[in-house]
Each structure stands twice: as structure tokens, then as C-alpha cells.
Image (cartoon, rainbow, N blue to C red):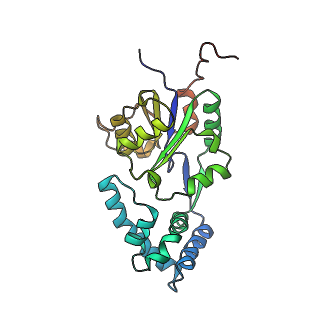
Amino acid sequence: MIPEIDTVFFDLGDTLRFVEKDLNHIKKAQSRLVELLETDEDPVSFHEKLKSRYKGYRVWAMENAAEAPESELWTRWLAPDFPAEKVVPLSTELTYQFRQTNGRRVVVDGGREVIKELKNRGYKLGIISNLISTSEIPEWLEEDGLAGYFSSVLLSSLYGKRKPDPEIYLEAARRAHSLPQTCAYVGDNLNRDVTGTRQAGFRMAIIFTTPEVLSSSEITDANRPDMTIHNFRQLLEIFPERPVPVGTAP
């Protein structure tokens, strides 16, 4: 007998949250980076230099399926020309502001509704995300009143491993006290989110993307999702209310 799904995990970027290009938000973050490091460089030019250096870090991170601690990210990759004793205490705030230079992050349309309804239907919920920041997501969940909805939140910045390494999925399941074969994962990247869940033994991999992106993607046996959705609210059609365990009071 195939076990029922009792836990649903979500990716963050381009799944549960999207970036809005708010120019004022971006400029404020660029200026804050310069202010924190006390450099007289132009904020826009300095940010471009950081982005160029970050590309090198990304290559290393993806090749090793690893995430460096924020202190190492800045002392080794992004700001090696600044004194380490100055950079290390600022690394958490620097990473947060560097992330903000992409724009303002907002919850996907229907996201709160779906999260709350799935929780009401009896599912354990979790987050598994490749992310360089340690503070951004805990703060966001608290501010939006969503922290209590997730049994397991595992970020590569805190765990050290990145998707598609199956270990990050397995660890997230352990923290949720769930078996991999009873877990589903909702993400947007075929080659990262599907292959990782397959190797970890998750029961279902769901890709949330647009028809245009999907049509231009190469789908293989290794990255083929179990289901594809184009509207986040479709998850409520996939996951019905879970049965109340025998002996549980109404």
C-alpha cells in the first residue's frame, strides 16, 4: 500500500515568493551596503562589483552543492579587500541588504490562502530553499504571521548543503518528523527541485511555472515532475483534506 502524503514542502524563490523591481527599495539597499562598509565608492558601481564577484561564488556553490557561511561569503568572495575583523560582524546584515538589491520580495498570489488552508486540512508544511541569508526568512515569517504554519524550515545558508543534494531534503523531512515517502515538494526548477526530491525518495515533485518556461525546458526521465501547475491555488485541488486518525476526538 502506498503511504499517503502528510507533508508538503515549498521552495521560496519563484515559488512561494517573487521579486518586484522596486527602484527605491533597490537604491536604499545599495546605499546601505556602502554605508555598512564605510566605503566612499558609488553605491551603484560598488553593487555591480559585488554582483560580479557573486557570480564566482555561485559557480563554486553549485559545483559543490554547498553554501558558505555568511562570514565566509563576504571575507572570501564578496569583500576580500576589506578587513575581516570589520566584515565578519556585519556579514548577516550585509547579506540581507545584498539580497534586497534584487528588489522587494512578495508572497505569490494566493500563497497565504493556500498555506493556511493546507494546514487546516491536516498537512505538515515546510520550506527547503537555497538561500545565502540566515536572517531574511525567519524575519519574514514572523512579520507576515506565517511562522507557526511551518514545521520545518531548512535553508542552505544554515545547513551548508544546497539543493539538489538529497541530504537537504532528507534533513528537512527528519525535522518535520516525516518519512520521505510521505512528502511532496513544490518548486520551480526541474533540474534542481525534481532531481533532488527523486534522490531523496520524496513521494511527489510538483513544478510551479509558466507554460512558456515549461515549453522551453528540456524534460528528461531524471527531471520529469509528477505534476505541473501554473496557478498556486491549484495545490488545493491536489491535496484534499486529510482523514482524521481513528480515535481522534472531533
Query: How many marks are shown on the rendered structure?
Result: 0
The quadrant in which the N terminus is found is: top left
Residue 52 visible in the shown view: no
Q: Residue at x 31, y 43 (%)?
A: 218
The quadrant in which the C terminus is found is: top right
**Looking at the image, is 182 positioned above or below residue 243?**
below
Indicate the quadrant where residue 206 lies.
Answer: top left
Nearest the eye: 212 or 160: 160
Residue 68 visible in the shown view: yes
Nearest the eye: 112 or 24: 112
Q: Residue at x 49, y 38 (%)?
A: 175
**Looking at the image, is 81 positioned above or below residue 149?**
below
Query: Residue 47, position in %: x, y?
Result: 48, 74
**Looking at the image, is 178 positioned above or below residue 101?**
above
Query: Residue 249, position in %: x, y?
Result: 69, 16
Q: Residue at x 65, y 36 (%)?
A: 116
**Looking at the image, is 214 positioned above or below residue 87?**
above
Query: Residue 188, position in %: x, y?
Result: 45, 44
Q: In this view, does 67 lie to the left or right of 176?
A: left
Q: Which residue is drawn at 39% across and 56% down?
A: 67
Q: In the image as oriented, which residue stretches furthest toward the bottom?
A: 40
